[in-house]
Image (tube, coloured by chain):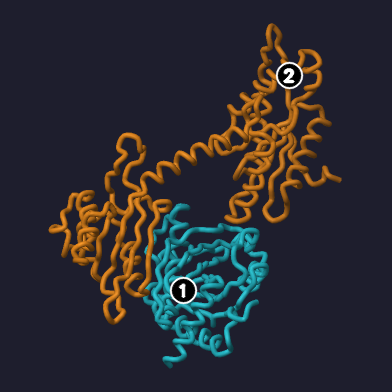
Amino acid sequence: MTAELLLSEDQRDALQEVTNIAMGQAGARLAQILDTFVHLSVPRINITGSAQITQAIEHMVGSGASITAIRQSFGGTLHGEAMVVYDELGCRNLADLMGYEDDMGQAQERELLLDVGNVLVGACLNGVADLLNATLSFSAPTLIAENAGVDRLINTQQLTWNYALLVEVRFTLEIRDFTCHLLTLMPEESIIQLKNALDTFMDNL
Amino acid sequence: MLGEIGDFIVTEVSVGIFALDKTYNVLVWNRFMADHSGISAENAIGRNLFELFPELPQKWLSKKIDSVFVLRNFAFTSWEQRPYLFPFRHNRPITGGIDYMQQNATFMPVRDADGEVSAVAVTLFDVTDAAVYQSMLKQAMAKLEESSSRDGLTGVYNRRFTEARLIDEIGRVERYHHDPFSVVLLDLDHFKQVNDTYGHLGGDEVLRVVADRVRGVLRDTDVFGRYGGEEFLLMLPQTNREGAMVVAERIRFAIGSETVQFNDTEIRVTSSLGVAVYVPGSQNVEEVKQQADEALYASKRSGRNRVTFYEASQAA
């Protein structure tokens, strides 16, 4: 790995700090939307080589499980892709909290997966962006896996990057059976921008 | 000058643009929205969106708009899950074959100087053309799949497709705890003699007629495939032992009740059937097929032209 991609100890601490604060804020904001307390885990931060990416994700979300997942691009000061990985329950237990009626067809179930994913991604990444004085815009989310294996998330035959920053946060709800993982992935060139933003953040402390 | 150009673009661009405040009152309403809704900007601005369009799904849409204010986040809707928000006419009234304009919408937070979200700006794209092409593509794909899943002679499903459906059904039973399904294996009795006596053309005619007769007694949800030369496999979803035995008996009777007309001769045909039920959690595809096969063999052994249900004791 080239040295410019490595986070210094200070940068790593700062990123951990920034993501911790952002997740706290995200939890409070999500509670306003979902009318229930949302628990977010302490973010896990990793820099992963492209050959190890599936392994790294399996380590975080568990291997062998049947998952459903959406992805969404973000751009602006930082760019990359976010994924929300659901277990076999999907989002069905969140339907009423997101304003859906009881009788949902397949299209509505998919829309709910996209809606929930979009809200979780936005809540977390906007929080990080605000702290780092970055601006972000988002593309529409798309479904990338339905009841599939974790190895379906990323086609490792076709990767155009060598290293990526991987940040994982796990969500659980207090009153409903619901778990999912948010994976934020940023390729090499975005890591360098992130390092600059972290340096500025530390200078301003 | 720049502001004027910006205003001009927002007004004239052929994309729907509107903006809402926290109470869903309309702040901006461009010409695209006015032209398609029949509600002018003067009549829309200052009015509540849900009063202007009572048919909008308010519970869901207000939640989405709220999330943009609270999370300072983008939000989206896609025609693939929700074909449209507003029932607008589209520009393919003749060739479209679609009821309303298909729409993709993006909801964007408009931040004030303090970083707080003061409004939500919405862009609404007409994606009817993409929807039309996609539905054409889907039809073509479905036709292709259909033609590659059928047996050429009898028109029933081929072996590959039938097995794929068996695997699908096991998945459904396990995932959604559907009722178990039954598998019926059917073999024509003494078919070799038919071929020897009447030639392959006679044999082919028998297979075609038998397939028609079986189809006549099946339900829409049953899957009926040709499995090998004169062997057929049926998958009966949500059907228990009693139900499957009734269907199998009906099939046996339908096949043997009349002779098959071939040129000037009448060919008598009977069939032997074996029935097994898939029990969730305990079996795989091979096992349930094996059980139906053992039951079929028992029908053959005990004189043919009959239906046998698989009993575990037979296996011993």
Residue at the top extreme of this rendering: B264
Return the mark for residue B300.
Answer: none
Residue B192 versus residue B199: which sits nearer the camera?
B199
Residue at the right extreme of this rendering: B316
Identify the residue shown where x is 41% and y is 72%: A136
Residue A170 versus residue B223: which sits nearer the camera?
A170
Pinpoint the chain carrying mark 2. B
Mark 2, residue position:
B203
Query: Which of the chains is cyan?
Result: A
The percent coordinates of residue A205 (x first, y second) are 43, 93
Q: Quadrant of residue B221?
A: top right
Residue at the left extreme of this rendering: B42
Same chain assignment for discs 2 and 1: no
Identify the residue shown where x is 37% and y is 50%: B83
User: Could you tell me how many numbered marks the image carries?
Assistant: 2
Residue B26 versus residue B248: which sits nearer the camera?
B26
Mark 1, residue position:
A78
Identify the residue shown where x is 65% and y is 40%: B242
Q: Separation of disc 2 and disc 1 at Cα?
A: 70 Å
The percent coordinates of residue B99 (x first, y second) are 33, 42
Q: Quadrant of residue B257?
A: top right
Pinpoint the chain carrying mark 1. A
Residue at the bottom extreme of this rendering: A205
Residue B247 seen in the current view? no
Chain B shade: orange
Instruction: Name above or below for residue B179 compared with residue B245.
Output: below
The percent coordinates of residue B231 (x first, y second) are 73, 30
Query: Which element carries disc 1, helix, strand or loop?
Result: loop
**Is A66 displayed left or right of B128 in the figure?**
right
Residue A165 seen in the current view? yes
For the residue marked with disc 1, what is the amino acid?
Leu
